[in-house]
Structure formats: C-alpha cells, structure tokens
Image (cartoon, helix red, strand yellow):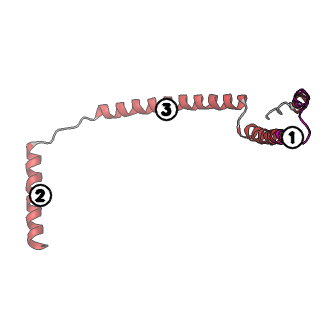
C-alpha cells in the first residue's frame, strides 16, 4: 500500500499569510483567487500522480520480475538454438542429380502439352 503524502497545507497557509502581510494584500484581491485556483490545480494533479505512479518498491519489484523473465527467455532461446543446430547437423541437403532434373523437365513439358491439347 502506498504511504499517504505529507500534508503541507498548514505551513503553506502560514507562508501565504506572511506574504499577504508583507505585501499588504487585501482579502478581496484577485491574486488570492489565482492562488486558490493554483492550489486546486496542484491538489488535482497530486491526486492523479499518487494514484497513477507506482511506488519505488512496486517499480523495483516489476524490474526484478522483468529481469527474471528476460533471463528465462534467454535460457529458453539458447536451448532452442542448440536443439535446432543439433537437428540440422544430422541432415545435409543433397544436390539434385542431373537425371532427376531431366526427368522433372520432361514431366513438365509432357504435362504442358497434355493440358494444351485436352483442356484448352
């Protein structure tokens, strides 16, 4: 659970009162309305930030899980690569013989002639 953010409103209000006295700002001055609007804005974004951003511990746990998952994926992929290399090492491709190529060409020619004569 996330710890509650510290409440600085009382010290902030005291600082505003000191500032108002120092500069002789009246209660109905427009600048106080701007200041109040700014406080509303800050409170809104602080709530969103605290709700949406994970705490440092959550972030660290997520990074550790990512590290473990990446290590597992790397180990699994290395195992797969080794198996593929071992599988491929036993079987070598054999080049086609001249007789096989000649027979394939003759078959293609005869098939083309038969298709041209009977189907077209």
Q: Secondary structure at mark 2?
A: helix
Q: Which mark is residue 76?
A: 3
Note whether 114 is above or below 69 in the view shown. Answer: below
Q: Tell me the quarter of the picture where residue 95 sits.
A: top left
Asked if the stretch drawn in magenta spans residue 81, the answer is: no
Q: Nearer the viewer, residue 23 or 35?
A: 23
**Number of dots carrying numbers:** 3
- Report the span colored magenta: 16-33
Q: Is residue 1 left or right of residue 15?
A: left
**Screen quadrant of the N terminus:** top right
Q: Is residue 100 left or right of residue 24?
A: left
Q: Nearer the viewer, residue 67 or 18?
A: 18
Q: Tell me the quarter of the picture where residue 18 sits.
A: top right
Label 1 – label 3 distance at C-alpha: 69 Å
Q: Main secondary structure of the magenta part?
A: helix
Q: Secondary structure at mark 3?
A: helix
Residue 70 rendering spot, x and y as whole percentages: 54, 31
Q: Is residue 67 left or right of residue 99?
A: right
Mark 2 or 3 closer to N-term?
3
Marks 1,3: beta carbons within 8 A: no
Q: Is residue 59 left or right of residue 112?
A: right
Q: Which residue is mark 2?
A: 108
Q: Secondary structure at mark 1?
A: loop
Q: Nearer the viewer, residue 13 or 28?
A: 28
Residue at the (8%, 61%) spot, across then down: 110
Residue 107 rendering spot, x and y as whole percentages: 11, 57
Label 2 – label 3 distance at C-alpha: 46 Å
Mark closer to the observer (1, 3): 1
Q: Which residue is mark 1?
A: 29
């Amino acid at each position: 659970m996330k710890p509650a953010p510290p409440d600085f409103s009382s010290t902030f209000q005291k600082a505003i009162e000191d500032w108002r006295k120092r500069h002789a700002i009246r209660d109905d001055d427009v600048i106080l309305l701007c200041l109040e609007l700014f406080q509303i804005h800050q409170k809104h974004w602080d709530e969103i930030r605290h709700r949406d951003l994970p705490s440092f511990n959550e972030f660290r746990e997520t990074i550790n899980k990512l590290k473990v998952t990446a290590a597992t994926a790397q180990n699994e992929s290395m195992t797969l690569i080794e198996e593929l290399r071992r599988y491929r090492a036993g079987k070598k491709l054999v080049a086609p013989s001249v007789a096989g190529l000649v027979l394939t060409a003759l078959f293609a020619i005869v098939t083309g002639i038969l298709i041209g004569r009977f189907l077209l």
